[in-house]
Image (cartoon, grey):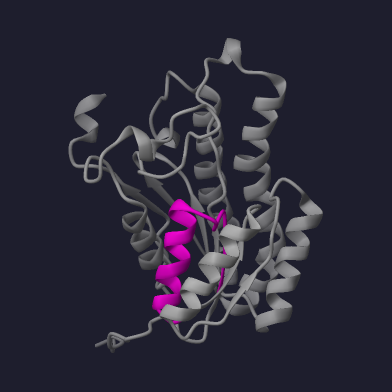
Amino acid sequence: MVDRPTALEDPLDGRTALVTGASSGIGAATARVLAEDGADVCLAARRVERLESLADEIRDATDAAVSVVPTDVTDSDAVRALVDATVERFGSLDIVVCNAGLGIDKPVAELTDEEYRLMTGVNVDGMFYTAREALPHLEASEGNLVFLGSMSGNHPRPHNPVYAATKWWVRGFASSLQGSIGEENVGVTCVNPTEVRTEFGSESGETLEASFEEGEVTEAIEVADAIAYAVRQRSPNTVLSLDLYRRDKLSHF
């Protein structure tokens, strides 16, 4: 019989987590949850004041050590510096949550070159840069790498094909990456929620937070809890893909 580990009050105690896109929404909620679970956290995003405010909040509420590294994930040098700073500050890297992402809700014929490059730069290049720089450290710690995907990476999104394509890329990259590094004992997860009531959509106008009342769609904390579940998995197990859908969502297709 295999001994099962007992539940821990702080299941991530002694581990270090890096969260991109941490200034609001899913990223901020994830940082809070991982710190509550015992992890030290590095917060990365472009909005420095938001990051500093969140860091103070987490320090007041938990025993976690928190660092802030303002980062543009579309800049490969900045991402390299982010990972280096995290390891220098905490000594190791055990959990990486690639959450930074955005969507510009326009038909393909109306999408400008700049808007196209911005979406692919954040949603594709940013995910790749973060994974590439983090992998050597995650291999050393037998850690966990999480990508924030979307239901748009599982089903067609007729009103925004480019955004959907970036999320199909994320899901395919995560699955194939797990296949290529599984023997290094790194767990890779792609978490795919339906609509989440956050600032997502601000690049196009109305945000999802403004579009839905509380309780109508998924909340950021619910996605954060799913991410926390995934990173609690230890070798040899991983949650490869986690679809966090509203119960009524598939009836809309």
Q: Does the magenta stretch include residue 106?
A: no
Image height of 212 relative to 13, above or below: above
Report the side of 111 relative to 133 (left or right): left
Image height of 37 relative to 104, above or below: below
Report the side of 98 relative to 3 (left or right): right
Q: Position of residue 176 (x, y in %)?
A: 56, 49
Q: In which quarter of the image is the N terminus?
A: bottom left
Q: Position of residue 144 (x, y in %)?
A: 52, 68
Report the side of 165 relative to 199 (left or right): right
Residue at 70 percent across and 50 percent down: it is 72
Bounds of the magenta span?
Answer: 17-38
Q: Position of residue 28 (x, y in %)?
A: 47, 60
User: Visible in this render: residue 143?
Assistant: yes
User: Visible in this render: residue 236?
Assistant: no
Q: Quadrant of the C terminus?
A: top left
Q: Which of 92 and 175 is in front in this view?
A: 92
Residue at 49 percent across and 43 percent down: it is 171
Tally of numbered discs: 0
Quadrant of residue 209 within the rendered picture: top left
Quadrant of residue 96 within the rendered picture: bottom right
Residue at 42 percent across and 18 percent down: it is 158
Direction top: furthest residue: 109
Q: Position of residue 225 (x, y in %)?
A: 34, 63
Residue at 60 percent across and 41 percent down: it is 123
Quadrant of residue 248 within the rendered picture: top left
Image height of 29 relative to 109, above or below: below
Q: Nearer the viewer, residue 136 or 87?
A: 87
Image height of 240 relative to 55, above or below: above
